């Protein structure tokens, strides 16, 4: 299995679809499905029927997961969407290195 380079808490930029160019924080990572949930991205709404706890009904909205291939990691140092390579940095043998600014993400 290909390893996932995106972690919870990272900032990513969306590459495709209605949220293209939007940036958000990764809230959840599903390594098996290779999908991520990104704050404010791929939002969906559901109207709720009136129930005992919400007699008026209501609307809930939340983010659906997006495929990891549709987002790009944003470097925390240079602020640009970037690919990464693995390298040795500060004791970490496989640190994520920004290919644009060569700093660890
Ligand atoms: Zn960078």
Image (tube, helix red, strand yellow):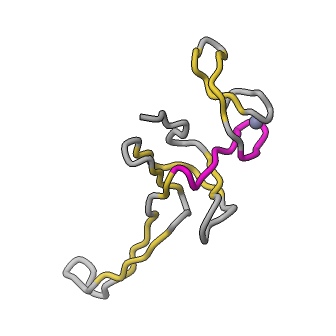
Q: Position of residue 64 (x, y in %)?
A: 44, 63
Please report the residue visible at 68 percent of the width from the left and 39 percent of the height from the top.
83
Q: Position of residue 5 (x, y in %)?
A: 55, 36
Give the tally of numbered discs.
0
Q: Is residue 2 left or right of residue 88?
A: left
Question: Magenta stretch containing residue 55, yes or no?
Answer: no
| Quadrant the N terminus occupies | top left
Does 104 sit above or below residue 75?
above
Does 100 sit above or below residue 49?
above
Q: Which residues are magenta?
A: 68-81
Please report the residue visible at 47 percent of the width from the left and 35 percent of the height from the top.
2
Please report the residue visible at 76 percent of the width from the left and 44 percent of the height from the top.
79
Ligand 1 in which quarter? top right
- Single out the residue that lies furthest toward the top: 91
Please report the residue visible at 49 percent of the width from the left and 54 percent of the height from the top.
67
| Quadrant the C terminus occupies | top right
Does 57 sit above or below residue 15?
below
Q: Position of residue 95 (x, y in %)?
A: 61, 23
Report which quarter residue 80 is drawn in. top right
Does 50 sit above or below residue 24?
below
Question: Magenta stretch containing residue 73, yes or no?
Answer: yes
Compare residues 58 and 76 and report the one nearer the observer.
76
Compare residues 100 and 76 and report the one nearer the observer.
100
Q: Position of residue 77 (x, y in %)?
A: 75, 35
């Amino acid at each position: 299995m290909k390893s996932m380079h995106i972690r919870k808490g990272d900032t990513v930029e969306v590459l495709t679809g209605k949220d293209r160019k939007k940036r958000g924080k990764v809230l959840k990572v599903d390594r098996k499905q290779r999908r991520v949930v990104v704050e404010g991205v791929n939002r969906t709404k559901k109207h709720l029927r009136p129930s005992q706890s919400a007699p008026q009904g209501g609307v809930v909205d939340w983010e659906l997961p997006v495929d990891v291939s549709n987002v790009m990691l944003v470097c925390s140092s240079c602020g640009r969407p970037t690919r990464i390579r693995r390298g040795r940095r500060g004791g970490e043998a496989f640190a994520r290195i920004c290919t644009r600014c060569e700093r660890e993400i």
